Image: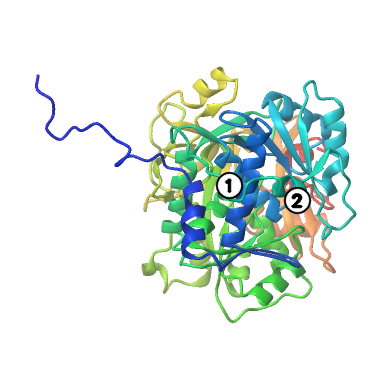
């Protein structure tokens, strides 16, 4: 058999490993004086950020950190967190960003399971970190971020502070791209709401393609002004820091997420883009002093299906919302609800219903399917529910030290999401629930998301979450937890009467509980906490 005439062996001239770290070198060359990071009184250009990242990578190397080592960081959205996203992979190591709201025992588990050799700690988060380090079973280099712009004085845990560590590095240090684009770039842990969190390993290739995919599908321009409200520990901030480096964007860092802070930043810096969970949109919409802007702000939202009423209300303030869908295992967004100009003439409520759909696979993904229990595609009727399955370049390499869970996740050549959705006629999916959140009442499947969507239409409801409550007759019935808007009131009878006008009888909440809802750092409502209260 003769060799295919079009088959050639890749060489160094025509094959370079894909990595988002390459973006910063190019941007520092082309736009060295353009603002890269703004954080309170601190401001860095792209040339300065690149130099700082080379210093940090060099300093890590001097301490023996290299290929395959893990560098963990527990920090707010500050310049140090963004620099770590470039410098750690530049050193050859793997970046492990840790959820800032985790308890000390879970932090200890992550440090041990990931075998972190370096732990960069935001001084404002020192208490939990200190307890985690005290229980750690191996030596680790601790570097303190002493941020004087925090809400409280920072505490030091280690032998060196971040600035001193960075300055000890070589500003002209040479660094290498990964040997393979399939090398790990990040280690992110799942929320761990049932058992120990799993370590999700993602690759340089996945990060590169996710960053370029969001540039393409979100229509990002050169030099966007991006407000970083998405926690950088969550799916590496949806890979947006790497995307901003490719576009020489300006990132405005935020330590605390408040409506007043977001409104002020948009006004001061003329923010063009930001991302956040639907609960952030609800916070803005329900703020006592809302601001309506005369320039369009593009917002990407994900994390939970946003109620149509919230989408419609937030757009009246000048925000254009794009819905996306993904998980930690997919490096964040892999599905996007791209807008079709044919829908421009629709009524506002029709538009918001369309925007509440999660959409179709993004350009860096291979596809999305909704399958029934038999593994068959559900009809594209917008009614039949099944589990979402995904495939593409941004899907994780696997779970760290957990081959069984990895094999289960990829059992049929697709990644099983654990989320339930319907498929619409136009090929867009719409998430209805997590498998574990579906309520089975008298043999009927009830979507908690559908009920929450109705509750959010009530004028007094700020946030709502619905979980299953055990019931002797029906097995389970819906129980609604409601957080009311400031200076608004409602009682259980009023809420149930409202639901009676919009929901079938078996779907209506049978119990109403009022009070502040528990939320994660990414803005998701913690339903597992609510289940403990029913």
Q: Quadrant of the N terminus?
A: top left
In the image, farthest residue toward the left: 2
> Which of the labelled discs sits on residue 86, or is there none?
1
Q: Is residue 344 left or right of residue 92?
A: left
Q: Residue at x 75, y 26 (%)?
A: 109
Element type where label 1 sits in the image = helix
Is 29 placed above or below 472 here?
Answer: below
Residue 272 seen in the current view: yes
In the image, farthest residue toward the bottom: 294
Is 529 placed above or below 194 here?
Answer: below
Residue 44 location, quadrant: bottom right
Instruction: Classify 10 Å Cα crowding around label 1: few (below 14), some (14-19), many (20 and above).
Output: many
Of the pair 119 and 159, the residue shown nearer to us: 159
Of the pair 205 and 118, the residue shown nearer to us: 118
> Which of the labelled discs sits on residue 163, or is there none?
2
Q: CA distance from mark 2 to mark 1?
A: 16 Å
Is 436 placed above or below 256 here?
Answer: above
Residue 462 location, quadrant: bottom right
Percent from the top left, x then y, of residue 532? 81, 35
Of the pair 73 and 67, the residue shown nearer to us: 67
Q: Is residue 507 left or right of residue 368?
A: right
Percent from the top left, x then y, of residue 224? 53, 67
Element type where label 2 sits in the image = helix
Counting residues from the start of the chain, the first of labels 2 and 1 encountered is: 1
Q: Residue at x 58, y 52 (%)?
A: 302
């Amino acid at each position: 058999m003769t060799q295919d005439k079009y088959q050639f062996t890749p060489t160094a001239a025509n094959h370079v490993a894909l990595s988002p770290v390459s973006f910063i070198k190019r941007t520092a060359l082309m736009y060295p004086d353009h603002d890269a990071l703004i954080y309170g009184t601190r401001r860095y250009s792209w040339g300065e950020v690149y130099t700082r990242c080379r210093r940090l990578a060099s300093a890590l190397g001097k301490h023996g950190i290299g290929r395959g080592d893990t560098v963990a960081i527990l920090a707010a959205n500050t310049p140090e967190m963004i620099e770590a996203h470039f410098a750690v992979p530049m050193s050859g190591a793997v970046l492990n960003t840790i959820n800032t709201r985790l308890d000390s025992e879970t932090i200890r588990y992550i440090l041990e399971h990931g075998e972190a050799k370096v732990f960069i700690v935001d001084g404002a988060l020192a208490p939990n970190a200190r307890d985690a380090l005290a229980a750690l079973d191996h030596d680790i280099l601790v570097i303190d971020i002493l941020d004087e712009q925090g809400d409280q004085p920072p505490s030091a845990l280690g032998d060196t502070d971040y600035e001193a560590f960075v300055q000890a590095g070589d500003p002209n240090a040479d660094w290498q791209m990964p040997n393979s684009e399939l090398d790990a770039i990040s280690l992110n842990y799942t929320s761990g709401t049932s058992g120990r969190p799993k370590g999700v390993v993602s690759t340089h290739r996945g990060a590169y393609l996710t960053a370029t995919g969001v540039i393409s599908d979100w229509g990002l321009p050169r030099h966007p002004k991006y407000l970083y409200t998405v926690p950088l520990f969550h799916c590496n901030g949806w890979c947006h820091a790497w995307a901003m480096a490719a576009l020489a964007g300006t990132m405005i860092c935020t330590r605390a997420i408040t409506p007043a802070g977001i409104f002020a930043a948009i006004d001061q810096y003329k923010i063009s883009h930001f991302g956040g969970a639907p609960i952030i949109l609800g916070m803005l919409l329900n703020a006592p002093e809302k601001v309506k802007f005369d320039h369009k702000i593009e917002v990407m939202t994900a994390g939970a299906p946003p109620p149509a009423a919230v989408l419609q209300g937030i757009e009246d303030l000048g925000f254009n919302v794009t819905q996306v869908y993904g998980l930690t295992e997919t490096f964040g967004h892999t599905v996007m609800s791209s807008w079709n100009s044919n829908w421009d003439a629709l009524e506002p409520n029709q538009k918001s219903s369309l925007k509440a759909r999660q959409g179709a696979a993004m350009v860096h993904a291979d596809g999305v399917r909704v399958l029934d229990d038999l593994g068959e595609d559900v009809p594209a009727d917008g009614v039949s529910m099944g589990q979402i399955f995904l495939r593409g370049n941004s899907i994780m390499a696997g779970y760290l030290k957990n081959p069984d869970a990895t094999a289960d996740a990829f059992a049929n050549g697709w990644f099983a999401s654990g989320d339930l959705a319907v498929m619409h006629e136009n090929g867009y999916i719409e998430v209805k629930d997590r498998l574990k959140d579906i309520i089975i009442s008298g043999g009927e499947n009830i979507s908690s998301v559908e009920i929450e969507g109705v509750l959010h239409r009530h004028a007094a409801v700020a946030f709502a979450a619905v979980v299953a409550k055990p019931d002797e007759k029906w097995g389970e019935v819906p129980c609604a937890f409601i957080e009311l808007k400031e200076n608004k009131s409602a009682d259980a009878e009023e809420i149930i009467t409202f639901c009676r006008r919009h929901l079938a009888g078996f779907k209506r909440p049978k119990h109403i509980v009022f009070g502040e809802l528990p939320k994660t750092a990414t803005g998701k409502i913690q339903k597992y906490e609510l289940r403990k209260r029913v």
